[in-house]
Image: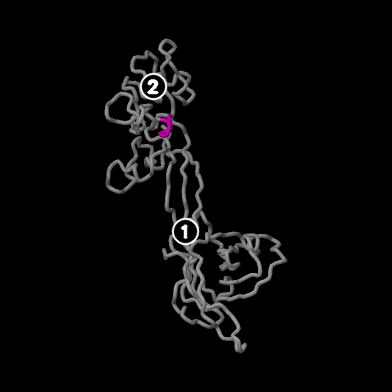
Amino acid sequence: MKKLISFIFSILLLSSCDDGDIIITSFEFDDVDLQICNGSKTDEFVFFKINTSINEAISYNFISETFSETTVTPTPITIDLKDNTSSVIYRKFDTAITADYYCSNLPPSNISVTEELVASSGIAEISTEIILEDDNDGIPAEDEDLNGNGNLDDDDTDGDGIPNYKDQDDDDDNILTSVELPNEIPDNDDPRDTDGDGIPDYLEADDDDDGIPTRNEDADGNGNPRDDRDPDSGLLFYLDPESTNTSVTVDPKAENTVRTTYRTTVIITGVEFNGNNGDFQDSDLSFGFKDVTISITDPKPNNN
């Protein structure tokens, strides 16, 4: 399932005696990106790879009411190529093509197919999984395993129901983790620890250890402690243990954004082209995978 698309199969060429033999040739799509677009029919999709160096391409079109690049498949979507709702086609062209050949409502008319192979049978499996979820807070997801047990979902510093690797504000103090990381010490990448208690600011609810939670050192109550300063010292209240500001009650910010990467993998087994299975009976024809990353903003589950 995980191998890249690298396969060898028959290219249909006429022999010198024009007897219609299949001549075995090889080609590779290893370094070619998998692309996808909507087909012309309802719920139709087209996966394709284009090798511009020798004007060839391979495509797989199928119809599915459940497929989506951003919907996880608990089990692979399985489609039999014999059911006439999908097809695998290899083509060579007389000139270079672009994605418009498969994705445009009106494909280019000045392109001719010089060779074509159509799969007559095979079983396609299409699966989509989440391979990465991250809050883009400056700390790689794998480094937010504070418990060291390998289960990132166990680490939820502020108890808001969102594990740290998906929480943009790990301590719920209304200051993003990405903002609380820099320590302003030259040549030192350690996270900032204002009160020197060994707990980084981004994991601590009271950064200056003055007894007032950082979130509540927000004099104007606008949800941003970073714009509230002591008029005498000029220091931010939440970073100044000597300030005499009054604690106010401020709710945590209501939304959180997670960057999620989905990976769709396409593989076809038992492929036969034009009824001639050659060396490809029960072999795997892997189209490789395609990743798509989106940012999803949701309300926090606990906003108290």
- Which quarter of the picture shows residue 198? top left
Q: Residue 85, located in which quarter of the rendered image?
A: bottom right
Q: Is mark 1 on a helix, strand or loop?
A: strand
Image disc number at residue 128: 1
The x and y percentages for residue 211 are: 32, 20
* Residue farthest to the front, as pictured: 16
Which residue corresponds to the image point at 58% horizontal and 76% vertical from the top-left?
Answer: 117
Q: Measured along the vertical axis of the image, is residue 111 above or below residue 141?
A: below
Q: Distance between the residues labelled 2 and 1?
A: 44 Å
Percent x, y of residue 188? 34, 31
Q: Which residue is drawn at 71% across and 62% down?
A: 106
Left or right, 298 with respect to 59, comes to left
Q: Three-letter amino acid code at disc 1?
A: Thr
222 relative to 257, above or below:
above
Q: What stretch is highlighted in magenta?
A: 175-179
Outermost residue on the right side: it is 109
Tell me the number on the disc at residue 181: none
Q: Nearer the viewer, residue 159 or 94?
A: 94
Magenta region includes residue 178: yes
In which quadrant of the rendered image does the C terminus lie?
top left
Check disc 1: other Cα within 10 Å, few if <14, some if 14-19, many if 20+: many
- Viewer-proximal residue among 169 and 5: 5
Neighbor class of circle 2 (other Cα within 10 Å; few <14, some 14-19, many 20+) is many
Residue bearing mark 2: 238
The image quadrant where one finds the N terminus is bottom left
Residue 81 is situated, as x and y percent measured from the top left of the image, at: 54, 74
- The amino acid type found where label 2 is placed reads Tyr
Q: Earlier in the sequence, mark 2 or mark 1?
A: 1
Would you say 267 lies left or right of 198 here? right
Residue 299: x and y, percent? Answer: 48, 39
The answer to if 22 sits in the magenta stretch is no
Secondary structure of the magenta portion, mostly?
helix
